Amino acid sequence: MKHTVCLVPGDGIGPEVAHAAQRVIDASGVDIEWITLPAGAAAVETHGEVLPEETVRAIEAHRVALKGPVTTPIGGGFTSVNVGLRKRLNLYAAVRPVRSMPGVKTRFDDVDLVVVRENTEGLYSGLENEITAGVVQSLKIATRTACERIARYAFNYAHERGRKRVTVFHKANILKKSDGLFLACAREVHEAIAPDVEYEELIIDNGCMQLVRDPTRFDIVLMENLYGDIVSDLCAGLVGGLGVVPGANIGDGCAVFEAVHGSAPDIAGKNLANPLALIMSGVMMLNHLHEREAASRIREAYDAVLREANPKEITRDIGGAGGTEDFAEAIVRRL
């Protein structure tokens, strides 16, 4: 079957890792027509905006995209492209699988968990105002619709992937209304559609402590938007960092698969960036497109490269001396 996929290279190292991921996916034999689209700081120069309408319309039409990292200014400047895409396309579920990778040495072994994050509201609704000089207010939004929707996604994911437990991280002891609603919806959905899946709740500060003590006790971790953004990066640190963790943003109509690391402008164009996170995100994309055999072959190929740990084939961030293209070439050879 032929697929049309929107490719958004992004900023900084984005074009390099996007090219590497595209090369690996094409080598798997899947028939893909790639449509390259602008977004991020680079798009401002050519289109006058960070998220051109043509990019949004193309993803809406073709329903799937692979996206490299984009620049987001801190404390000012243009708004986040990632947040904009999630809102425009209603990509309500952020999914971040985190697993121990062969050959990547960390403090922990056998980590295999999935962070499921509500992606459209909470403090990321961006409703802020200055009440008076020196006093700023941010509003945290929680709706029953969004809370039920993300809980349903998490429990359905558990059934589809054979996962046994869903743990909800919350702060309902303090945020009794917003996080209280999130908990209530998770409990109701659990009872309604997945009573066979184990269910637990942890106050988020305790949950973070438990994660760094023994991450192997967790399976699926479900949380609201801000918590999920922070905890997913914490979990990435358990297995080697953002360079070895994929990500997906899923909605009912569209899905955008992305590397969750930054655009690293300091090493852009130097053939130093690790392309693995975007390649892994491409594997998630292939599974989404029901190209599971090709996805499995790519996963086995990059696992083999990591396991063999030839310094000439892997990048410096994971102990090698190779470049972006060397890593991609090593995976392609094994395919």
Image (cartoon, grey):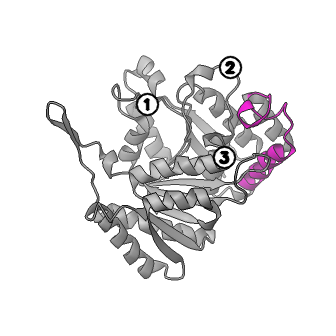
Q: Tell me the magenta residue range.
A: 294-323
Q: Which residue is mark 3?
A: 280
The Cα–Cα distance between marks 3 and 2, rounded to whole angstroms, is: 22 Å
Would residue 175 appear left or right of 297 to someone viewing this image? left
> In the structure shown, which secondary structural element does the residue marked by tag 3 occupy?
helix
User: What is the three-letter code of the residue carrying label 1?
Assistant: Thr
Which quarter of the figure has residue 263?
Answer: top right
The residue drawn where x is 37% and y is 25% is 49
> In the structure shown, which secondary structural element does the residue marked by tag 1 occupy?
loop
User: What is the three-letter code of the residue carrying label 3?
Assistant: Met
The residue drawn where x is 74% and y is 31% is 316
Q: Which residue is mark 1?
A: 72
Taking depth in this image into account, of 40 and 62 the one nearest to the observer is 40
The residue drawn where x is 66% and y is 60% is 112
The residue drawn where x is 46% and y is 79% is 193
So how many labels did they put on this image? 3
Q: Which residue is mark 2?
A: 270
Of badges 3 and 2, nearer the viewer stands 2
Q: Position of residue 10 (x, y in %)?
A: 53, 30
Which quarter of the figure has residue 133?
Answer: top left
In the image, residue 327 above or below residue 44: below
The Cα–Cα distance between marks 3 and 1, rounded to whole angstroms, is: 23 Å
Would residue 260 appear left or right of 299 to someone viewing this image? left
Would residue 25 appear left or right of 44 to someone viewing this image? right
Residue 126: in sight, yes or no? yes
